[in-house]
Amino acid sequence: MNGFIPHLVHDPGEIPRLGDPLVDEYLRFVAARARHNTLLAQTFDLKVFFTIVGKTPTQVGTSDVFEFIQAPTATPNGNVVRLADGESGLAASTIKRRLASIAGLFTYLGERGLIDNSPVPRGLTTRAVRSQIRGVPLIRAPRRLPRILGPDEANALLGALRSERDRAMILLMLFGGLRRCEVLGLRMADVRPGERRVFVSAGKGGHQRIVPVTSAFFTSLGSYLDGERPPGAATDHVFLVLKRPRRGSPLTAAGLDEILSGARIRAGLPHATCHELRHTCFTRLREPNAASIPHCHRGRAVGRNSTSQNLRQNPRHRWSLRRDHSD
């Protein structure tokens, strides 16, 4: 019985391939209906899965799935560390996401009539209650409150930034709730200073929204555009690289992470990520000074359909940022 060891091939502008006809067909299907980041995430998840099981899709059984679930927890060399608690091994949420990617592949193959049944169980059956079968999920991912920055931490982070460009990007995440990819994808036409808003044209899932942002962002943005942004840039991206050799090119995710990491170290903060800045914004939306934003629009402003989860976070947290960092 011949096995399958995936080999990732991802040419610029092309759909990634792993070397198996069925898997590559599924990736083309994902590319036609999902965002590029989703495609890359599923490609990586499937690569990890088939590297571990070493079988073609038609050879995979339920026992292989169970072995895959157990495999990430065995990290004797300790080279995988969970950010949540610092312990060794992958987080349950990561394994759960990978199972979802695997289940998507086999559901597709089942609908195509290429396999009889999906080898990925929906859950573990426990008992029957009133003629209904009850079960438990394969992976239990605990729901944790996201980490956020307090007012002093936010002030320290803003004070450690070295350019108006960097300050504008951080303010967008901290007071506008934009995701990292949304900040980097911002175009000149998306900025509406007269309305004190920015237009997010390509949010998560392709959704668009208009976000009100603190006036401090537009002040920093104006200083960046007047004195820092490379003149004559060939792109309309707002945030560009300021130093050579890539001066004038759109800033990348790795570049923004490096900027934030450096500012965090200079500020002496134990944590500060792009996602934490976004969740810090969520917390501010619950406070009395955010009452001017209608509740029905708050979820849309931050790119969510509902803020019910956000309203459970840190109900006693109050902000009092210095005037030069807020409205």
Image: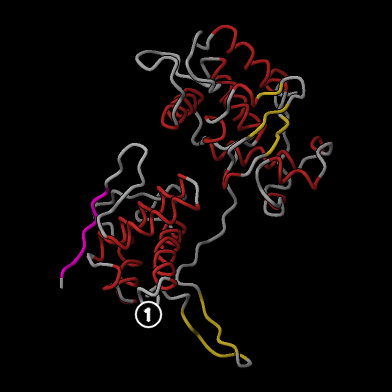
Q: Residue at x 29, y 72 (%)?
A: 58
Within-10-Å neighbours for mark 1: few <14, some 14–19, many 20+: few
In this rendering, the answer to whether 299 lies above or below 48 is above
Tag 1 residue = 116
* Residue drawn where x is 31% and y is 76% of the image: 61
Residue type for callout 1? Asp
Query: In screen coordinates, is 268 left or right of 158?
Result: left
- State the image coordinates of residue 178 (x, y, percent, origin top left): 61, 35
- Segment colored magenta: 2-8
Figure quadrant of residue 54: bottom left
Q: Is residue 59 left or right of residue 305?
A: left
- Residue at (21, 63) in percent of width and height: 4
| Quadrant assignment for the C terminus | top right
Front in this rendered view, residue 223 or 265:
223
Residue at the extreme bottom of the image, as rendered: 131
Residue 169 lies within the magenta run: no
Q: How is the image coloured?
A: secondary structure
- Residue 79 % position (x, y): 28, 48
Establish if 115 lies above or below 308: below
Q: Which quarter of the figure is the N terminus placed in?
A: bottom left
In the rendered structure, the answer to whether residue 69 lies left or right of residue 233 reads: left
- In this view, the residue in front, 89 or 33, is 33
x and y percent of residue 317 in the render?
71, 41
Asked if residue 152 is positioned above or below residue 242 in the image, the reply reads below
Q: Is residue 32 above or below residue 55?
A: above
Q: Is 7 part of what is drawn in magenta?
A: yes
Viewed as shown, does residue 265 lie left or right of 170? left
Determine the main secondary structure of the stretch shown in magenta.
Answer: loop
Tag 1 secondary structure: loop
Question: Looking at the image, which residue is at 70% across and 35% down?
Answer: 210
Where, by quadrant of the figure, is residue 51 drawn? Answer: bottom left
Quarter of the rendering containing residue 67:
bottom left
